Image (cartoon, rainbow, N blue to C red):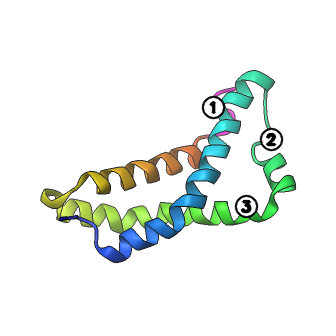
Amino acid sequence: MRSALPRWLRAVWLCLSPLGLLFATRIAWEKTVWTWSRGRQTVGFSLMHIHPFFAIVGAVCCYLLMLWLIPSAVYVVRRRQDLSALDKGMIGCTLFVVLAITLPDTFFA
């Protein structure tokens, strides 16, 4: 299978994405659903106090995924004719992480 991303970038994404996506999903849940149903939130407060290891490792994985997006964007631009569906999915998931983490906590308030 042809891919625009080299194997080392795909391997890094595979290592970081499980915890990074779970953490970003939890933060997005708190920023949207809990804010709509319960009012303003201190996003991540309960997560940090109930599961501190997951919160710390998940945040680190999210920030590393954001950094992963820089070299992967360069490879995708240079090798855009070799772009596969898997590459698009990896970049799409990483863009979700970026959106979930960088969106202000009061956006849905």
* Mark 3 or mark 1: whose residue is earlier in sequence: 3
Residue labelled with disc 3: 54
Say what amino acid the circle numbered 3 marks.
Answer: Phe
Give SS at disc 1.
loop
Across and down, in percent, residue 74 comes to 28, 65
Give the residue at x 86% y 53%.
50
Q: Which residues are magenta?
A: 104-109
User: Crowding near pointer 2: few (<14 within 10 Å), some, many (20+)?
Assistant: few
Say what amino acid the circle numbered 1 marks.
Answer: Phe
Horizontal side of residue 91 vs 59, given as left or right: left
Residue labelled with disc 1: 107
Give the residue at x 17% y 58%.
80
Horizontal side of residue 83 vs 10, given as left or right: left
- Residue 71 position by quadrant: bottom left
Residue labelled with disc 2: 42
Give SS at disc 2.
loop
Q: Residue furthest left?
A: 81
What is the quadrant of the N terminus in the image? bottom left
Q: Residue furthest top?
A: 37
* Mark 1 or mark 2: whose residue is earlier in sequence: 2
Q: How many marks?
A: 3
Q: Are marks 3 and 2 in contact (CB under 8 Å)?
A: no
